[in-house]
Image: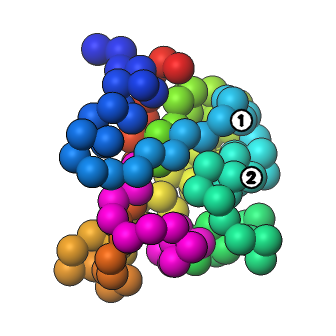
Amino acid sequence: MEHISNKTIADQARARGAYSHVIAGHPVDKLSTLDAIAAALSFPEWFGRNLDALYDGLTDLSWLPSGEHVLIWSGSDELKAADPRAYLAIRSVLSDAERALAPGGDRADSRRLTLALSDAD
């Protein structure tokens, strides 16, 4: 499998006019992962630190400029190894939010979310 760095993903996003947001560090539990996603996407203070609030934030993004927003998650395998249930739950919410904001999705507007898993920093 080819290793794609955060910088490469960010460069590709920028080349197509998208904004990139990198999840900092390699969180290995549910709450720190939620916090890292919230920080990467500059969630407002009202973020509730649970999966429902994560979905609500991801499908809103009204505080960010219009366009595509690429969320880069490097080291996701570390959460997967440490807490497989949390990993699957968070991945499910991220996938649901991507679909909801996609053209034709039930929350589609001027913003789109794309999740990019990176193998390297």
The residue shown at (28%, 14%) is 2
Residue 72 can be seen, yes or no: yes
Range covered by the magenta-colored residues? 57-70
Q: Nearer the viewer, residue 81 or 65?
A: 65
* Label 1 element class: loop
Q: Nearer the viewer, residue 41 or 88?
A: 41
Residue 93 % position (x, y):
51, 63
Residue, disc 2: 35
Counting residues from the start of the chain, the first of labels 1 and 2 encountered is: 1
Instruction: Please determine whether, in this image, residue 2 is positioned above or below residue 101.
Output: above
* Label 2 element class: helix
Residue, disc 1: 27
C-beta proximity under 8 Å, tags 1 and 2: yes
Residue type of the residue flagged with mark 1: Pro
Residue 114 can be seen, yes or no: no
Q: Is residue 31 magenta?
A: no
Residue type of the residue flagged with mark 2: Asp
Residue 114 % position (x, y):
36, 53
Q: Residue furthest bottom?
A: 106
Q: Residues within 10 Å of mark 2 (few under 14, many from 20)?
A: some
| Label 1 to label 2: alpha-carbon separation | 9 Å
38 vs 10, left or right, is right
Residue 6 % position (x, y):
45, 27
